[in-house]
Amino acid sequence: MVSVRSGRRTASLATVLLVFSLAGCSTLGLGSTPKPDDIFDLAAPTAFDGSTRRSSAQILVPLPNASDALSSARIAVRADGGSISYLPGVSWSDELPPLIQTIMVRAFENSGRVKAVGKPGESLAIDDQVIVDIRAFELDVTGSPAAHVTLGVKLLDERNGKVRASKVFDVSRPAASDRPKDAITAIDQAASAAVAEVVVWTAGAL
């Protein structure tokens, strides 16, 4: 039982309990600061093969869809049996859906293939939406390490709500090893190639 009659004794006891509490945290490692992840960004493509057709459309890129396993800043690794883990000590600069959304917008801007492109809330008069489903975005180690990016894309006519066209873009790039930096380099290359294909196809379909 703790007496509350003496403010001085109560304060003294509180101080002692705080010291023991902090000591316990230190012993358990709870008071230590974990080492931060190395953070990596994705590069928006600047080179675009195929048709040079330019559309007069203004397009919107909503936030892409992704599974719970991919809807984070962690970098996914797919192993035998379809199991998914994550590369230790590294992460993307943002959760994957908003990161892909940003890269997609920048890619359309870099290409010059559409009149204008933006995200929701930017007050553009929209002709079409580019709806993206992130189906794979990972290092695949079921065989030799390779980056694997799959994007399902629909072009939605904003005026009548009809799907104008749809296509799945599937790109793989070999990784030098399964070490984080080699994996991230390969994923970046695969993502850039897939996004560039989306831009060229979209401009041709509008």
Image: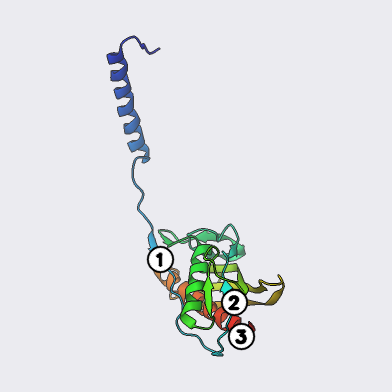
Alpha carbon of mark 3 to alpha carbon of mark 2: how far? 18 Å
Instruction: Give the mark nearest the N terminus, 2 or 1.
Output: 1
- Return the residue nearer the eye: 68 or 109: 109
Q: Which residue is mark 3?
A: 204
| SS under mark 1 | strand
| SS under mark 3 | helix
Q: Which residue is mark 2?
A: 170
- Return the residue nearer the eye: 92 or 141: 92
Instruction: Give the mark nearest the N terminus, 3 or 1.
Output: 1
- Return the residue nearer the eye: 107 or 142: 107
Whether residue 13 is visible, yes or no, is: yes
Who's the residue at 40% across and 66% down the image? 40
**Percent of width and height locating residue 26:** 33, 37
Q: Amino acid at mark 1?
A: Phe
- Return the residue nearer the eye: 163 or 12: 163
**Percent of width and height locating residue 180:** 42, 66
In the image, farthest residue toward the top: 5
- Please say if the residues under marks 3 and 1 sit with CB atoms less than 8 Å apart: no
**Percent of width and height locating residue 140:** 54, 70
Q: Is residue 21 left or right of residue 170?
A: left
Who's the residue at 35% across and 52% down the image? 35
What mark, if any, has residue 40 been given in the picture? Answer: 1
Where 200 falls versus 105 (above or below)? below
Quadrant that contains the C terminus: bottom right
Alpha carbon of mark 3 to alpha carbon of mark 1: how far? 32 Å
Residue 171 figure quarter = bottom right
**Percent of width and height locating residue 78:** 55, 65
Instruction: Give the mark nearest the N terminus, 3 or 2.
Output: 2
Label 3 packing within 10 angstroms: few (<14), some (14-19), many (20+) = some
Where 161 falls versus 49 (above or below)? above
